[in-house]
Image (spheres, rainbow, N blue to C red):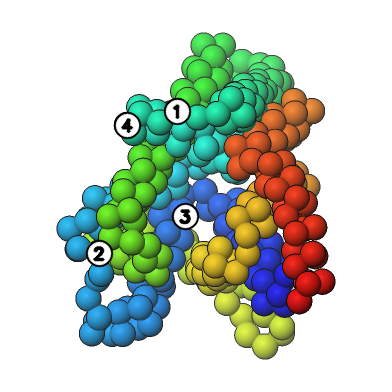
Amino acid sequence: MKARAWFLLAQVLVICGTRELAMEMHVKEDPGCGNLITFCSFLFISIEGFIFTTKCGTLGPIVPFRSWTTLVVMYFIISVTNNYALNFNISMPLHMIFRAGSLMANMVMGMVILHKRYSPMKYLSVILISLGIGLCTIMSSQNVTSKSKDSNLNHSGNATNAKHESSTIHPDEDNDHDSWDMIMWCIGLAMLTFALFMSARMGIYQEVIYKKFGKHPKEALFYSHCLPLPGFLFLSQNIYTHFMIAMNSPALSILGLVEVPRMMFYLLCNVLTQYMCISAVFTLTSECASLTVTLVVTLRKFLSLLFSIWYFQNPFTLWHWVGTLMVFSGTLLFSDVPGMIKKAREQQPDKDQSKKIQ
């Protein structure tokens, strides 16, 4: 593998992992900041694309403008839905694991819309992914209930100590609080499910565009981030609110030279690392075999998950680990990694033989 490919591989692992870290650090302090981060990322990528992809508007799109509109609407809805899901008791590990189930959604939508049929190995991988996500979902729902119960126990203890100081505390209120937490979690879960299948539908539509007009990833990247910008006007109040929260956050000293609001620093890190991550993945696909890209992206997701659990002390049980391993094992099976490894080994003697002849 070339030195450039090794550099891109390391960039995907480090930069994309750093982006997950910056995202979670920001979300920990301000759970509703998702739309702010998404808007800033879209704006940055749009400015970069306007300058370098369209040459300041002098180059028109190769794909008809109308074809990008549907894709852009779907992409905008998916991004906003995934962001809002974090406001409904959805933890970052569950968010990351659930989105790793895109293969399952793609297969289902492919069967329904394109009438595709797959090999037994593909179906097995989807079953593994589905079971893994289901297991993690069930365990996370128990964590939500446990948190509510712990909160209720503390509340009850305080009420006992206070005795008759307040007559407004009733057991029904605790039950209502527990039920409300579960309802919020179910809403967040439904939002993730909707975004997952909408993303699969978008992928199928994008596949149709590529077959019809050819692959133009840079153009797709620019228009998918530029055209949705007016849609953020509907979220302007939310974006402004969380921008002010970021501006008023405690100061953070950078190398002892300058102090900036801490969450503004997280926001800047999110925007830059998001752009670098996307660019690195796009370039890596042109430099390396699909096996390498699949392994790198899967490894990056898994390492990000491990770091999230360790650094942020997110609740993660043994069953969470089992579910996570099932999800990533299913992903590797779906990508036919064992078959690609076998094929690569079979082709290696032929390459060595051709070198000797030369």
Quadrant for the C terminus, please.
bottom right
The residues bearing labels 4 and 2 have C-alpha atoms spaced at a distance of: 23 Å
Q: Nearer the viewer, residue 112 or 355?
A: 355
If you read the primary sequence from the N terminus, does the residue marked by circle 2 or circle 3 appear first? 3
Quadrant for the N terminus, please.
bottom right
Q: Which residue is mark 4?
A: 113
Q: Disc 4 vs disc 1: which is toward the camera?
A: 1
Tag 1: amino acid: Arg
Q: Nearer the viewer, residue 4 or 278?
A: 4
| Helix, strand or loop at mark 4 | helix
The residues bearing labels 3 and 4 have C-alpha atoms spaced at a distance of: 35 Å
Residue 312 x %, y %: 72, 48
Mark 2 near mark 3, Cβ–Cβ under 8 Å? Answer: no
If you read the primary sequence from the N terminus, does the residue marked by circle 2 or circle 1 appear first? 2
| Helix, strand or loop at mark 2 | loop
Tag of residue 69: none
The residues bearing labels 4 and 1 have C-alpha atoms spaced at a distance of: 11 Å
Taking the view exactly as shown, the residue that stands out farthest to the front is 357
Tag of residue 33: 3
* Numbered label tally: 4
> Which image quadrant for residue 10?
bottom right
Q: Nearer the viewer, residue 146 or 156?
A: 146
If you read the primary sequence from the N terminus, does the residue marked by circle 1 or circle 3 appear first? 3
If you read the primary sequence from the N terminus, does the residue marked by circle 4 or circle 2 appear first? 2
Tag 3: amino acid: Cys
> Which image quadrant for residue 137?
top right
| Helix, strand or loop at mark 3 | loop
Residue 249 x %, y %: 55, 65
The residues bearing labels 1 and 3 have C-alpha atoms spaced at a distance of: 41 Å
Residue 130 appears anywhere in the view: no
Residue 69 x %, y %: 22, 55
Give the crowd class for mark 1: few <14, some 14-19, many >=20 residues within 10 Å. Answer: few
